[in-house]
Image (spheres, rainbow, N blue to C red):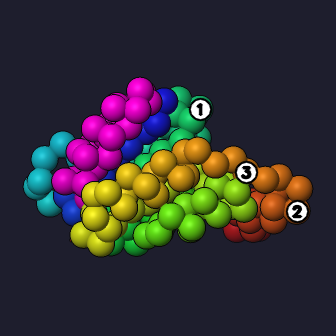
């Protein structure tokens, strides 16, 4: 299952990304927001990050207006590797190199079709392991230093 969430800035694009995933037969659970009313993006990041960390979701997708605020918030959760992607190459690398368990999109930045391509690339690629695993482990060692 893929967990998805957004603030009001990502709400519109989130609806389309959910539709895209469902069309591909991918199970998705929407953790809100559920209206266009203004909400605070850290509050929207929390339930998706917790679902991923608890193993309820394999991965997560988060959206806000730029994708910046919600990615910053998500990366405060130990164990979350959230990658803000605005292009397909970054989405591939986010999986292959960074093993990103959450991808973030800017609902006011990327168009619908590009967002679908970014999400697909991130879902279809795999972490390459090896030296990239060592680097990811070093990220989590930094968390332990805090
Ligand atoms: C909300 O206006 C906007 O600040 C938010 O969606 C996001 O872009 C923050 O990084």
Label 2, ligand 1: CB separation under 8 Å: no
Q: Is mark 1 on a helix, strand or loop?
A: loop
Answer yes or no: do the residues labelled 2 and 1 have beta carbons within 8 Å? no
Dot 1 or dot 3: first in sequence order is 1
What residue range appears in magenta?
A: 10-32
Q: How crowded is mark 3: few (under 14 residues within 10 Å), some or many (20 or more)?
A: some
Q: How crowded is mark 2: few (under 14 residues within 10 Å), some or many (20 or more)?
A: few
Q: Nearer the viewer, residue 113 or 65?
A: 113
Q: What residue is shown with label 2? A: 131
Q: Which of 10 and 31 is in front in this view?
A: 10
Q: Quadrant of residue 123?
A: top right
Q: How many labels does the image show?
A: 3
Residue 69 can be seen in this image: no
- The Cα atoms of the two marked residues, 2 and 3, are separated by 11 Å
Dot 2 or dot 1: first in sequence order is 1
Which residue shows up at 64% across the image and 63% down it? 93
Where is residue 97 shown, x and y percent of the image? 72, 62
Q: Nearer the viewer, residue 40 or 55?
A: 55
Q: Quadrant of residue 132?
A: bottom right
Whether residue 133 is situated above or below residue 55 in the rendered picture: below
Where is residue 124 shown, x and y percent of the image? 58, 44
Q: What residue is shown with label 1? A: 55
Judged by its main secondary structure, the magenta piece is helix
- The Cα atoms of the two marked residues, 1 and 3, are separated by 18 Å
Give the position of the C terminus as an image quadrant: bottom right
- The Cα atoms of the two marked residues, 2 and 1, are separated by 25 Å
Where is residue 47 shown, x and y percent of the image? 41, 43
Answer yes or no: do the residues labelled 1 and 3 have beta carbons within 8 Å? no
Which residue shows up at 41% across the image and 27% down it? 25
Q: What residue is shown with label 3? A: 127
Which residue shows up at 34% across the image and 32% down it? 23
């Amino acid at each position: 299952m893929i967990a998805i969430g957004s603030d009001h800035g990502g709400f519109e694009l989130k609806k389309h990304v959910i539709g895209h995933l469902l069309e591909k037969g991918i199970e998705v659970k929407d953790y809100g927001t559920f209206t266009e009313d203004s909400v605070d993006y850290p509050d929207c990041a929390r339930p998706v990050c917790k679902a991923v960390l608890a193993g309820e979701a394999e991965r997560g997708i988060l959206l806000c207006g730029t994708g910046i605020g919600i990615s910053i918030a998500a990366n405060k959760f130990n164990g979350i590797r959230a990658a803000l992607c605005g292009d397909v190459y970054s989405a591939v690398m986010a999986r292959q190199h960074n093993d990103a368990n959450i991808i973030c999109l800017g609902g006011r930045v990327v168009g619908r079709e590009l967002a679908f391509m970014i999400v697909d690339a991130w879902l279809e690629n795999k972490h390459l392991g090896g030296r990239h695993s060592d680097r990811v482990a070093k990220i989590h060692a930094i968390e332990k230093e805090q």
